Amino acid sequence: MISEKDFVSTLEKLKKKSQFEDDIGNVFLKYEESYPTFPSCIDEAVFALDRCFENNEDDWVGYWVFELDFGRRYHDGCVMTKDGEKIDISTPDKLYKFILTLKENSDE
């Protein structure tokens, strides 16, 4: 298991790296130049973070990073329980706590 501090720090670093990659690509596009692709560790790091949690078969970290664009696309009500209760995963620390509740609920 990964600590909340390390989890949040890792996601913040991945977000910064992703933004850097986007910025580099945009520079090349601005000047209508083709640009080389750079190997990215983001996919592998997200996969590793998801595996840090038992009972996280739904890959919540990957969802938060790729579908919610590091939480930037999160909006109230975009994640809900089966009962219609809203789940706030707008920040890395809230995502961490949510994933922990999944583990706790599966242990019961």
Image (spheres, helix red, strand yellow):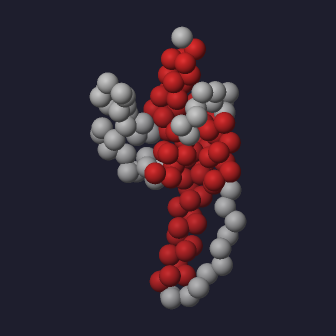
| Location of residue 3 in the rendering, given as x and y in whole percent from the top left corner | 63, 28
For the N terminus, the image quarter is top right
| Location of residue 21 in the rendering, given as x and y in whole percent from the top left corner | 58, 66
Quarter where residue 74 is shown? top left
| Location of residue 49 in the rendering, given as x and y in whole percent from the top left corner | 64, 40
| Location of residue 8 in the rendering, given as x and y in whole percent from the top left corner | 56, 38
Q: Is residue 3 visible?
A: no
Name the residue located 65 percent from the left edge and 73 percent from the top edge. Answer: 37
Q: Against 31, is 54 above or below? A: above
Name the residue located 50 percent from the left edge and 88 percent from the top edge. Answer: 31
Q: Which residue is the extreme one toward the top?
A: 108
Describe residue 40's horizontal placement relative to residue 106 as left or right. right
Q: Nearer the viewer, residue 36 or 103?
A: 103
Q: Which residue is the extreme one toward the front?
A: 82
Q: Against 32, is 14 above or below? A: above
Q: Against 60, is 14 above or below? A: below
Quarter where residue 2 is shown? top right
For the C terminus, the image quarter is top right
Name the residue located 50 percent from the left edge and 22 percent from the top edge. Answer: 101
Quarter where residue 90 is shown? top left
Q: Is residue 68 visible?
A: yes
Describe residue 14's horizontal placement relative to residue 93 as left or right. right
Q: Nearer the viewer, residue 51 or 93?
A: 51
Q: Which residue is the extreme one toward the bottom?
A: 32
Name the residue located 37 percent from the left edge and 28 percent from the top edge. Answer: 81
Q: Number of callouts in the render?
A: 0
Q: Against 41, is 2 above or below? A: above
